Image: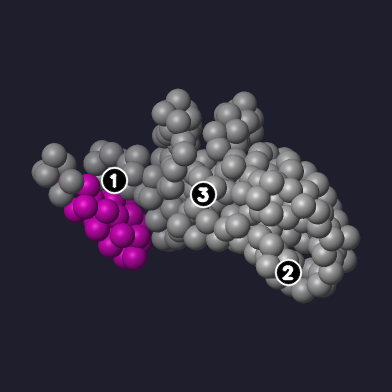
Amino acid sequence: MNVSYESCDGGLRLLKLFCTDDEIVVPDNINGEPVVSIGPRAFESCPQSGLRSLRIPISVRSADHDTLFGLVGLTDVIYEGTVEMFSDLRLFAYCDVTVKCADGFRFRFPKGFSMSFPDFDKEYRAFGFRSDDDVVISRLADPRMMEQEYIDFYQGMVRRRMMPRSEHAVAHSDTEELRTILSTGLMTDEDLVALLDLSLKSGKISVTSLLMSERRKLLGRQNQA
């Protein structure tokens, strides 16, 4: 791995990094000086080598919007800090990329959007009817840093599309898809009863078991309220 850098406030700014590994690791220090920032197009000289990930240390607190430009094959960014700290980097997704933070936050940013909040939510709402259900459901599953107006928008979108997707999942015994939809917490008891009826009539044992378990949880929460 070869790097070039310059001094900046608080430490060093990484200008270029050349690496052929599947996992590109940004150093947390160079010669004892902390790496606190990453410059524009810092990884564009890395040769294409199939799918790869990028690991960014918690010491990095700022970056350029186009830091990831030219990094071919990127699938994952692992940030060793919180989602709030990652959001402050204000990166841009030049391809579909999954971000994993040390605090457990995980989200797949689609190509062409800001990788920060609430910028992403604002841009995705403007995307309107072209938005992907899976992106919306994933965002609702862990709504950290999401403002209420975007929660309301996403929930409204999911509700409009939820039952047709759920019915399709039941018909095809797709329990993974059904779990994803249930994770939004937007299913009402009426919805679950309708899906259970469909599942029972179709003889979908695993789906029926999943829906019954979810209904018990829902009724339990209602009784505690």
Q: In this view, does 137 lie to the left or right of 197?
A: right
Whole-percent x and y of residue 161? Answer: 47, 36
Mark closer to the chain start, 2 or 3: 2
Give the residue pinned by disc 2: 31
- Magenta-highlighted residues: 196-219
Quadrant of res 50: bottom right
Mark 2 residue crowding within 10 angstroms, few (<14) / some (14–19) / many (20+): few
Residue at the spot of label 1: 192
The crowd level at tag 1 (other Cα within 10 Å; few <14, some 14-19, many 20+) is: some
For marks 3 and 1, the one nearer the N-term is 3
Residue labelled with disc 3: 83
- Element under disc 2: loop
Crowding near the residue tagged with mark 3, few <14, some 14–19, many ≥20 C-alpha atoms within 10 Å? many
Q: Which amino acid does label 2 sit on?
A: Asn
Can you tell which quarter of the image residue 4 is in? Answer: bottom right
Q: Which residue is drawn at 65% across and 41% down?
A: 90
